[in-house]
Image (spheres, helix red, strand yellow):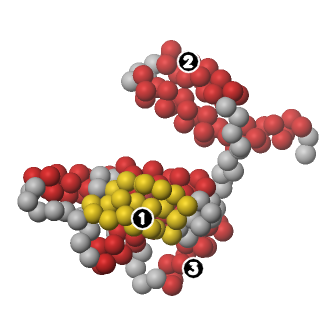
Amino acid sequence: MSPTSSVAAAVWRQLPFFVWLVALWMLLWGQFSVLAAVTGVIVAVVVTRVFRLPAVELSGRVNLWYGLVFVVMFFLALIRGSLLVAWQTLHPRRYPGTAVIAVPLRTDDDLIMAHVGVTASLIPGSLIVDVDRDRRILFLHVLGVSSDHDVDRQRRAVQGWESRIVRAVGSRAQLETIRAAGAQTPREGGAGL
């Protein structure tokens, strides 16, 4: 492989992150203009050159159908979580019940773990409080837990997010891991958290 083609391959692998930085810059400024895009490119170049992070290897596999399923389920969970937290706030006499639960993930990938953690934290009623990277465990503080059944339901919901993310952008090996784990458990979990 020539040096030119290896540089091109590295740029191609990092392109989604670069585009994400530009989009994030534009969202932060609340402007979707040519000037915001150009300054976003400049900031993304500076950030990627000054803060040298290890390259994240993407799977190269994107399933648009499961990506759409993830987005739809995420918005439904967002609405459900918002309504649930609002309901619990309006009834102050009824203590909603809280817990810190450990959720073991089934895949061994930092990027998938980060996506699952962010997804779980964005849904109202749950928040990541700690991560055990070596053992692949997320610790979440969750509202609306009053029994062991509720804890299991919350755990399955987070593992359901992991499954949806892997189906959308995970590697083939991660997909096989999720399928094998799904065959061992009777149910994968719902939209909630």
Using the image, tell me which numbered label, if any, was put on residue 26: none
Q: Name the residue under label 2.
A: 39
**Where is residue 178, by image quadrant?**
bottom right
- Are the residues tagged 1 and 2 within 8 Å (C-beta)? no
The kind of residue on which mark 3 rests is Ala
The residue shown at (62%, 63%) is: 134
If you read the primary sequence from the N terminus, does the residue marked by circle 3 or circle 1 appear first? 1
> What's the CA distance linking mark 3 and mark 1?
17 Å
The residue shown at (42%, 54%) is: 128
Give the SS element for disc 3: helix
Q: Mark 1 points at which residue?
A: 158
If you read the primary sequence from the N terminus, does the residue marked by circle 1 or circle 2 appear first? 2
> Where is 162 relative to 75, above or below?
below
Could you tell me residue 153's position as x and y percent? Answer: 33, 73
The kind of residue on which mark 1 rests is Val
If you read the primary sequence from the N terminus, does the residue marked by circle 2 or circle 3 appear first? 2
**Where is residue 151, by image quadrant?**
bottom left
Could you tell me residue 124's position as x and y percent? Answer: 29, 52
For label 2, the crowd category at 10 Å Cα-Cα, with few meaning under 14, some 14 to 19 and many 20 or more, is some
Of the pair 7 and 55, the residue shown nearer to us: 55
Farthest right residue? 2
The residue shown at (84%, 39%) is: 5
Instruction: Answer whether residue 168 is visible to the viewer in this image.
Output: no
Could you tell me residue 188's position as x and y percent? Answer: 42, 75
**Where is residue 181, by image quadrant?**
bottom right
Could you tell me residue 192's position as x and y percent? Answer: 31, 63
The kind of residue on which mark 2 rests is Thr
Q: Nearer the viewer, mark 1 or mark 2?
A: 1
> What's the CA distance linking mark 2 and mark 3?
46 Å
Q: Mark 3 points at which residue?
A: 180
Quadrant (top left, top right, bottom left, bottom right) of the N terminus: top right
Give the SS element for disc 2: helix
